Image: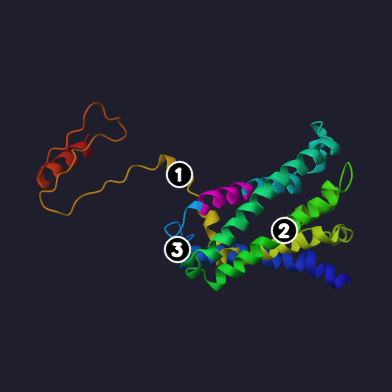
Amino acid sequence: MIALQTFLWVILPYICLTMLIVGTVWRWRVDKFGWTTRSSELHENRMLRIGSPLFHFGILAVGVGHVMGLLIPKSWTEAVGLGQTIYHLIATVGGMLAGTAATIGLILLIYRRRTVGGVFQATTRNDKFMYVLLALPIVLGMIAVILHQVLGGEHGYDYRETISPWLRGLLTFRPDTSLMAGVPIWFQLHVIAAFLLFAVWPYTRLIHFFSAPVAYPTRPYIVYRSREEGAPVRRPNRGWEPLVGPVSLEPITREEFGMTQDAEANK
């Protein structure tokens, strides 16, 4: 039993975290062009417009909730006057809403992938395996919340006395396996499934999580130039200055266009 506890709550998590870190670095160095979601929007976008935001915003909210609940010590929240009853209510209601949104979104995305011909043909075995490991922690987490938080009484199960300090100890290389011994089975399965997902994360399309387009709103405009000789070209405007009045679309030669660009660059 001690050997099993050590494997589940020390060895396995460190193996999974090592695979996450090493795999991400390897993918960045070797497979940058494969670092993509392989978008299937061209095949179908009606269900995608509903399922994708539900899943992504839901799973982001779930992630933020897990960080706050697992990494912030209980003593800190109590120090600012947030007792267990209020914390349990906020965490349970917020977790259920976020988990429900993520679950519904994932169901729609899987249904779309299975029923839309073009999307299904573009689905690889890796994708199917990824969806299984992605669904497991979400489903197990929802079951744990319903059984032990919603139906578990006023305070529910206080995971901040067991799972939270165990995880913080794991991240500081001082894991205490005894903290996980009495944790309800559904929470234990949820934790194991989450670490298994981390292990395969870099080797699936989930890798795009590390490439969130946060700089997109400030990205400069893309300039398109025609290859055809004598094609109408709109005279360039300076940087981010707004366009005032009608825009001239008079044809200009390549020489004029190049001179205008050089003049702008020298300003």
Q: Does residue 85 show up magenta in the picture?
A: no
Question: Alpha carbon of mark 3 to alpha carbon of mark 2: how far?
Answer: 32 Å
Q: Nearer the viewer, mark 1 or mark 2?
A: 2
Instruction: Please tell me how crowded label 2 is: few (under 14), some (14-19), or many (20+) other residues with Cα within 10 Å.
Output: some
Span of residues in magenta: 47-59
Callout 2: helix, strand or loop? helix
The x, y position of residue 175, in whole percent, is: 80, 59
- Which residue lies under the disc numbered 3? 32
121 or 242: nearer the viewer:
121
The x, y position of residue 1, in whole percent, is: 89, 71
- Which residue lies under the disc numbered 2? 139
Q: How is the image coloured?
A: rainbow
- Residue at 85%, 37% (x, y): give it: 85
In the rendered structure, find residue 231 and report the number of the disc placed on it. Answer: none
Question: Alpha carbon of mark 1 to alpha carbon of mark 2: how far?
Answer: 33 Å
Q: Does residue 51 show up magenta in the picture?
A: yes
Give residue 204's quadrant in the image.
bottom right
**Of callouts 1 and 2, the N-terminal one:** 2
Say what amino acid the circle numbered 2 marks.
Val
Q: Are marks 3 and 2 in contact (CB under 8 Å)?
A: no
Callout 1: helix, strand or loop? loop
Instruction: Please tell me how crowded label 1 is: few (under 14), some (14-19), or many (20+) other residues with Cα within 10 Å.
Output: few
Say what amino acid the circle numbered 1 marks.
Ala
- Residue at 89%, 59% (x, y): give it: 182
Q: Is residue 262 visible?
A: yes
Q: Is residue 76 visible?
A: no
- Which residue lies under the disc numbered 1? 215
44 or 195: nearer the viewer:
44
123 or 239: nearer the viewer:
123
Callout 3: helix, strand or loop? helix
